[in-house]
Image (cartoon, grey):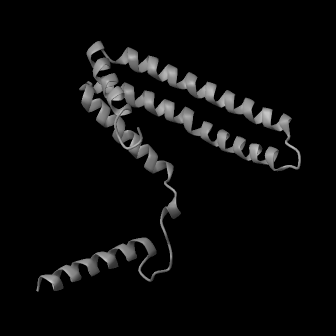
Amino acid sequence: MFGFLFGAACLAGLIHHKRRLHGFRGGGRRRGHGRRHRGFKRRLLRHKVERMLDVVDASDDQAREIHDIVDELTRTLFPLKDELRAGRHGMVDAVRADDLNEVELDAVFETQRDVVTRAQTALKHALQKMHATLDADQRAQLFDLFGHRATSGPYR
């Protein structure tokens, strides 16, 4: 009796899984097609910011200010990723030729340095604003959280 119920539950789960991934008729309509969209990343980032605000026990005004800081940083950093991707294609073109095209490779490296410098500047400004927004105890709690997370997890 128990085996029948367990088998029926597994079959129902399998049918639900197949319908969710491939549509009702199995037509191969996969959502996302293996790529996560920016909406997912932004929701994940918002969740992490909310967790951070809970840890430091931020007031409503501080929470609003920190959300604005993170949104501004996100708007600055996401386009830089596209520039790095374009540089990667330039690097492939420089290496693919019969002889290594050092001039094109140097141009790609210069572009990458420029993108990294802009990202560092944007992050520095965001951290300065966050530092000014939080009080000393909240900053201590926040950076204790950052320090603790940097040494734990599966990717040490």
Q: Identify whether 97 is placed above or below 126.
A: below
Q: Position of residue 10 (x, y in %)?
A: 26, 77
Q: Quadrant of the N terminus?
A: bottom left
**Residue in front for this viewpoint, 19 or 64:** 19
- Taking the view exactly as shown, the residue that stands out farthest to the front is 156
In this picture, residue 25 sits left or right of residue 53? right
- Taking the view exactly as shown, the residue that stands out farthest to the left is 1
Q: Position of residue 32 (x, y in %)?
A: 50, 61
Q: Identify whether 88 is placed above or below 65.
A: below
Q: Position of residue 76 (x, y in %)?
A: 56, 32
Quarter of the view holding residue 90: top right
Q: Position of residue 125 (x, y in %)?
A: 51, 20
Q: Quadrant of the C terminus?
A: top left
In this picture, residue 87 sits left or right of residue 20? right
Q: What residue is rendered at 31% in x and 24% in y?
A: 144
Q: What residue is rendered at 39% in x and 72% in y?
A: 20
**Residue in front for this viewpoint, 4 or 66:** 4
Quarter of the view holding residue 116: top right
Q: What residue is rendered at 47% in x and 23% in y?
A: 126
